[in-house]
Amino acid sequence: MKTIIEPFKIKSVEPIRFTTRNERIEILKEAYFNPFLIKADDVLIDLLTDSGTSAMSAKQWAGMMEGDESYAGARSFFRFEKAVREITDMKYIIPTHQGRAAEKILFTIIGGKGKFIPNNTHFDTTRANVEFSGAVAVDFQTEEGKQPNVIAPFKGNMNIPELEKFILKTGAENIPVCFITVTNNSGGGQPVSMENIRGTKSILKRYGIPLFIDACRFAENAFFIKKREPGYEDKTPKEIVQEMFSYADGVTMSAKKDAIVNMGGFLALNDENLAMQARNLLIVTEGFPTYGGLAGRDLEAIAQGLEEVLDEHYLTYRLRSVEYLGNKLTEIGIPILQPPGGHAIYIDAKGFVPQIPSNQYPGQAVVCELYKIGGIRSVEIGSVMFGKYDNEGKLITPAMELVRLAIPRRVYTQSHIDYVIECCEELFSNKNLLKGFSIVYEAPQLRHFTAHFKPL
Ligand SMILES: *Cc1c(COP(=O)(O)O)cnc(C)c1O
């Protein structure tokens, strides 16, 4: 097989700034060893997130000029509505400024005290919005989905037997909606099979509970289905996506992921009454229903991106470039969450630097070392992000200590990724020398964004 190449050529470029190792040591110190506090100009390869960091196509930029900025009834809205309807077939399509705005509107209406929202795994903002409404967010990962080393095709799946037990125990009347997140972001970017979506829907139908899809990475999920699920090899990504959404009663989406834009999102619904309430809230918090917190040009770019993301050459390149990085790290001997997901590689820091205990933040040590070696920015997903204190002030640590290398869409070429791999080789040879960190400042909530660290 020949090399899978980037299915685009480059027309507009953005320089990246090189720093020396000594400069980076100073920069890290000034940022209190927290990558969120490093200036983007001081980063060479930015793998902090795949959200809103994509490169738009020439056609998307052209769409920006075509954008109709009319307050009401803009042409761009109708193009956007058509594009979303084409893939989701939902009746009511409501633009929002990003995914969490769609979540906030939805859970304000259907959430509240005494309500429970199941999901294969809630993404942080989804969980936060469920809980903010007073409802309880419950995750139903499968057993294999919880095992970082197990290789299985659909580790993002919903645990359907556990979901059904939960419905019987809780009472369907207390479950206004059930979510499936594709791909399962917090579960390592792992895909959900069509069989699992269909199975979840049939259980929910029995109890009269609507199924919503958190669709941020719907195209990546569809391509995993094509490659891994029997019966889908000859279907187009679009056909697969249409079948996925045919089981859904509603969709929330952050366009910053698989619509390949820098800002945007939507809520799509089939229920007329719910749509009416959502639009009323939208007017208060986001804007008029035909722009919802976005400019007309943003709506154009989303419409175009939703089409481009379903291109097979794009999806082949997309999944392959993530897998390529994952396979190389495995060859080097760096333990990663297996198999590689759709948008990121997760290094298992606990397995990689076992000399650093969880309360000294092994993931943070890896993140800082990668920056020091090569100016690469990654993010800790472990005790820094999810650590909580008990009544005695002792740190309660999550099950896994991960470092995420998220790959922005269409931004970096293979040689950038090869450079990352070379830096990871150096990281591997230094691993026994890495030391932990202590936290010297933290905010009461979401401490990972602003915490200050001190090397031990
Ligand atoms: C990013 C994301 C969201 C929230 O979207 P924002 O646009 O960042 O508000 C919700 N769910 C999942 C799975 C995500 O990845």
Image (spheres, rainbow, N blue to C red):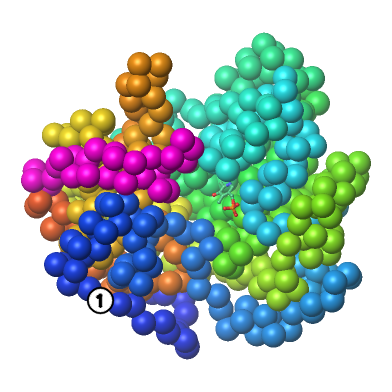
Residue highlighted by disc 1: 18
The C terminus sits in image quarter? top left
Q: Quadrant of residue 338?
A: top left
How far across and down, in percent of the image, does residue 285 sit? 77, 52
Which is more toward the observer, 50 or 415? Answer: 50
What residue lies at 79% left-to-right and 65% top-to-bottom? 291
Is residue 221 rendered to the left or right of residue 293?
left
What residue lies at 58% left-to-right and 43% top-to-bottom? 125
Q: Is residue 9 magenta?
A: no
- Start-end of magenta stretch: 431-456
Residue at the outermost top position:
169
Which is more toward the observer, 19 or 408? Answer: 19
- Asked if residue 273 shows in the view, the reply is yes
Residue 91 drawn above or below residue 21: above
The N terminus sits in image quarter? bottom left
Q: Is residue 433 magenta?
A: yes
Residue 50 drawn above or below residue 146: below
What residue lies at 79% left-to-right and 74% top-to-bottom? 76
How far across and down, in percent of the image, does residue 390 sit? 39, 19
What residue lies at 47% left-to-right and 41% top-to-bottom? 446
Is residue 304 rendered to the left or right of residue 32?
right
Rate crowding at label 1 as few (under 14), some (14 to 19) or many (20 or more) other CA atoms within 10 Å: some
Q: Amino acid at mark 1?
A: Phe
How far across and down, in percent of the image, does residue 242 sit? 70, 53
Which is more toward the observer, 48 or 443? Answer: 443
Is residue 45 rendered to the left or right of residue 435?
right
Residue at the outermost front position:
441
Q: Quadrant of residue 75?
A: bottom right
- Asked if residue 229 shows in the view, the reply is no
Count of all numbered marks drawn on residues in the image: 1
How far across and down, in percent of the image, does residue 140 sit? 55, 27
Which element is circle 1 on? loop
